[in-house]
Structure formats: C-alpha cells, structure tokens
Amino acid sequence: MIIKTIGVVGAGTMGNGIAQVFAQAGFTVRLVDVAQPMLDRARAAIDKSLAKFVEKGKLGDADKSATLGRLSTATSLDLLADADYIVEAIVESADAKSALFTTLDAIAGRHAILASNTSSISITRLGAATKRPDKVLGMHFMNPVPLMPLVEMIRGHATSEETLTTASELCVKLGKTPVEAADYPGFIANRILMPMINEAIYAVMEGVGTPEAIDSVMTLGMNHPMGPLTLADFIGLDVCLAIMNVLHVGLGDPKYRPCPLLRRMVAAGQLGRKSGQGFYTY
C-alpha cells in the first residue's frame, strides 16, 4: 500500500519526535493531542530540534521550512480520518491505549495501519480492541527519536506479514533500523534495560553506592554512554515504574519486582528531569 499521510496521537516527547522524523522524511503528518498547550510545546520542540540539525549542517533552511510545512496539529482525532498510518504515543497505560485503539479503529479508513509506540504493553491486547488486529503492531521508537536509529517492531498474535513488512519499509524510509521482537512484556529493549535500572535503584537503596558512583561504574567501567540512574531520570521514574509493573505482572517472576525506593520516589513526585528532581537535581 502507498502511505502518504501519517497520524501521530500524543504530543509528548516521543510523539513530537515521531512526528518530526516522519515530516522530515517527506510524509504529511497530523499530530493530535487533547491539550492545545501540548501541541504548542511540541511544535516549538520540533522547531528547536530542526534548528540544531541546520546548525550542524545536516539540514538546510529550506528543508526545515518544508518539514514544518508538512506538519499540522489538532485537538480532535477526526483529523485522522484519512490517515494511512497512525502511531499512538500516549501515556503508558494499557486501558488508555486500548480505549484509544477502539476509537481510532472507528475513525480511520479500513486500509489504515494502527501502530503503538508502547515500550512494554501487549500488542495482542491492543489489536483485540479493534476490528483490524491484522493491521495493528508495535513500533517502539527510542528516545530521542530524531537521533536514535533503532525501532523495535512488535508483531501481535494477529499482526499480518504484510503489515509488518509495510511498517519495516517505513522505518527504512525514516533512516531507522527495524528490529523485530515477539509480543512478550517489555519486548527486547525494556526486558533487558529496566531490570538493570531497577537493580541500580536497589543498589542506591541498600547503600551499595551513591547515584554518582553507580553511574560512574557503568559509564567508565562498562562503557555505557549514560549511567542507569541518569537514564532513569531521563526516561521518567514514573515510566520506569509502569514498565517494571508490566514485567512483574506479565511474567510473574519476583525478579521483576519494582524497587520500593522507585515506588516511593514516584509517589513523592520525584520523576526525574521532567519534575526537576529524581536521582539528580535539574
């Protein structure tokens, strides 16, 4: 199928990054969020990101203007009625995502593919919320979306080969590398990453080391580009907790139990960069 118009639902950090890369790749993009201020912030963030590409010589001024010209925003999902491909990037909640997929299924044309940027939630469950489970898949981008080359592609129980092929070809057009993962809690990326972050938080709680010491061991000793606690702050501790809960419930193994310190920090509103306080102060 020929894909020309892309819908993106959710104008947070991931949503605006996804909208940006599709617009940069020449697609008509419609970004939808329930709150106009979120859309205004998203457009400003995209403008700033594109300006950095121009500054580094990776994008021309004309290309920046053309990219922004291909992007429109709205607070109504009705804007997506003629979209060929829709990517959901809302809060990491199975109930919220399922409800949205039911709504999108009713609005979008029968040919449209519905993708979720979920980092851990069952694609099979999201597909079951629609009448087109064969056209539902996971398309998990990495943050920051304009810079990270990986897209984790998750096939639900009913996802067709044609849908996965179409989505993978889209990734290549975005300059990304698609990697397929099975529909298990956390998929590949977060099944490995989040337990490491969780263990680092246990190490803080038990006094094994300070956040600075733990991050230094992992960056200087293991050659990670960012320590696990710095990364947790960057992702958002609430998001980390949500993913750990999905792993714990979905896999039923106590090794995925979220660290009590993580639960306490989220309850206190210490969510990392976005709240100004996490394992570090921002």
Image (cartoon, rainbow, N blue to C red):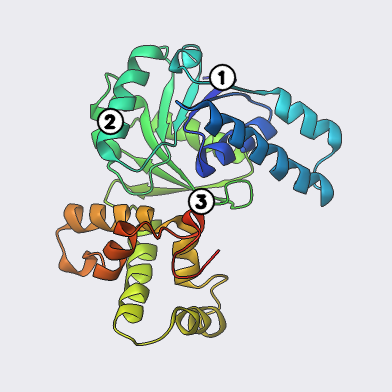
The answer to whether residue 152 is above or below residue 104 is: below
Q: Residue at x 50, y 39 (%)?
A: 12
Q: Residue at x 34, y 52 (%)?
A: 187
One can see residue 188 in this view: no
Is tag 2's residue or tag 3's residue first in the polypeptide sequence? 2
Label 2 or label 1, whichever lies nearer to me, is: 2
Type of the residue with mark 3: Met
Type of the residue with mark 2: Ser
Residue 92 position within the rendered picture, expressed as x and y whole percent measured from the top left:
35, 43
Residue 273 position within the rendered picture, expressed as x and y whole percent measured from the top left:
51, 58
Under circle 3, the secondary element is: loop
Compute the Cα span from label 1 to label 3.
Answer: 25 Å
Mark 3 Cα within 10 Å, few/some/many (few <14, many 20+)? Answer: some
Residue 168 position within the rendered picture, expressed as x and y whole percent measured from the top left:
50, 38
**Residue, disc 1:** 2
The answer to whether residue 227 is above or below residue 124 is: below
Label 1 or label 3, whichever lies nearer to me, is: 3
Under circle 1, the secondary element is: loop
**Residue, disc 2:** 98
Compute the Cα span from label 2 to label 1.
Answer: 26 Å
Q: Residue furthest bottom?
A: 208
Compute the Cα span from label 2 to label 3.
Answer: 22 Å
Total number of numbered labels?
3
**Residue, disc 3:** 142
Q: Are marks 2 and 3 in contact (CB under 8 Å)?
A: no
Is tag 1's residue or tag 3's residue first in the polypeptide sequence? 1
The answer to whether residue 207 is above or below residue 38 is: below
One can see residue 139 in this view: yes
On the image, which quarter does residue 257 sit in?
bottom left
Direction from residue 261 to residue 71 in the image, left or right: right
